[in-house]
C-alpha cells in the first residue's frame, strides 16, 4: 500500500506541478467505512496506476501488483493508522513523513513510542490541517463513479 500511495502521490504532484504529501493541509477528513465508498476509491487508485495496483483478491490474479485492500479499511480493521504503535520490537510508530525525509537512509525504527511525541512537538501535527469540516461522501461516490465509467 505504501508503494501505491507513494506512486500515486508522485504522479499527482508531477501532473499538477506541486510537491508534498497529498493530505497535507489540503483536505478535511472523516471516517469512511462504507464499502461502496472504499471500493470506489480503490478502483480510482487502480485506474490511475493500472500497472501497479489491483483489487483482485486471488493471489494468482494479482501478479506483481499491489493489492488495494479496501475491505480492511474502517474501524476495527487491521490497517496501520498514522501515529499508531506497531507490534514490533522497540515499539515503532507509523510516522507521517515529508518527501524530504524519504531517502535511502530512512530508518523506520527511528520513530518509536519513546521518540514520536518529541518529533510531533518539534515539527507539529501533520494532520492538524485536515481535521474539521467533513466531505460530501455521496458527491464523492458519484464523482468517482462518473470518472470510472459505467458499471463501476
Image: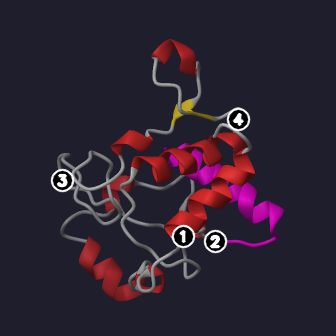
Mark 3 or 4: the one toward you: 4
Q: Is residue 57 above or below residue 75?
A: above
Sooner in the amino-acid sequence: mark 1 or mark 2: 2
x%, y% of residue 9?
A: 65, 58
Direction top: furthest residue: 60
According to the image, label 1 marks what residue? 98
Pick the quarter of the image with the C terminus. top right
Residue drawn at x 50%, y 66% as measured from the top left: 137
Q: Is residue 18 magenta?
A: yes
**Mark 2 — residue?**
20
In the structure shown, which secondary structural element does the residue marked by tag 2 occupy? loop
Within-10-Å neighbours for mark 3: few <14, some 14–19, many 20+: some
Which residue is drawn at the image coordinates 32% and 52% (left, top)?
Answer: 80
> Along the line of sight, which residue is nearer the eye, 46 or 2?
46
Labels 1 & 2 near each other (Cβ < 8 A): yes
Figure check: 142 above or below 25: above
For the residues marked 1 and 3, what is the alpha-carbon distance in whole angstroms?
23 Å
Q: How is the image coloured?
A: secondary structure
**Sequence-wise first label, 2 or 3:** 2
Q: Closer to the N terminus: mark 4 or mark 2?
A: 2
Q: Secondary structure at mark 1?
A: loop
| Mark 2 neighbour density, 10 Å: few (under 14) some (14–19) many (20 or more) | some
Circle 3 residue: 90
Q: Which residue is mark 4?
A: 50
Quadrant in the rendering for residue 151: top right
Which element is circle 4 on?
loop
Span colored in magenta: 1-19
Amino acid at each position: 500500500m505504501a508503494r501505491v500511495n507513494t506512486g500515486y502521490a508522485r504522479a499527482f504532484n508531477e501532473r499538477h506541478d506541486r510537491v508534498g504529501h497529498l493530505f497535507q493541509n489540503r483536505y478535511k477528513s472523516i471516517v469512511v467505512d462504507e464499502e461502496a465508498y472504499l471500493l470506489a476509491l480503490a478502483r480510482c487508485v487502480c485506474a490511475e496506476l493500472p500497472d501497479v495496483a489491483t483489487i483482485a483478491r486471488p493471489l494468482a490474479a494479482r501478479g506483481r501488483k499491489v493489492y488495494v485492500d479496501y475491505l480492511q479499511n474502517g474501524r476495527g480493521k487491521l490497517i496501520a493508522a498514522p501515529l499508531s504503535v506497531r507490534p514490533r520490537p522497540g515499539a515503532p510508530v507509523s510516522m507521517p513523513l515529508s518527501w524530504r525525509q524519504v531517502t535511502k537512509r530512512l530508518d523506520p525504527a527511528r520513530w518509536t513510542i519513546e521518540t514520536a511525541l518529541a518529533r510531533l512537538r518539534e515539527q507539529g501535527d501533520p494532520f492538524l490541517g485536515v481535521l474539521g469540516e467533513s466531505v460530501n461522501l455521496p458527491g464523492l461516490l458519484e464523482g468517482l463513479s462518473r470518472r470510472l465509467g459505467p458499471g463501476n
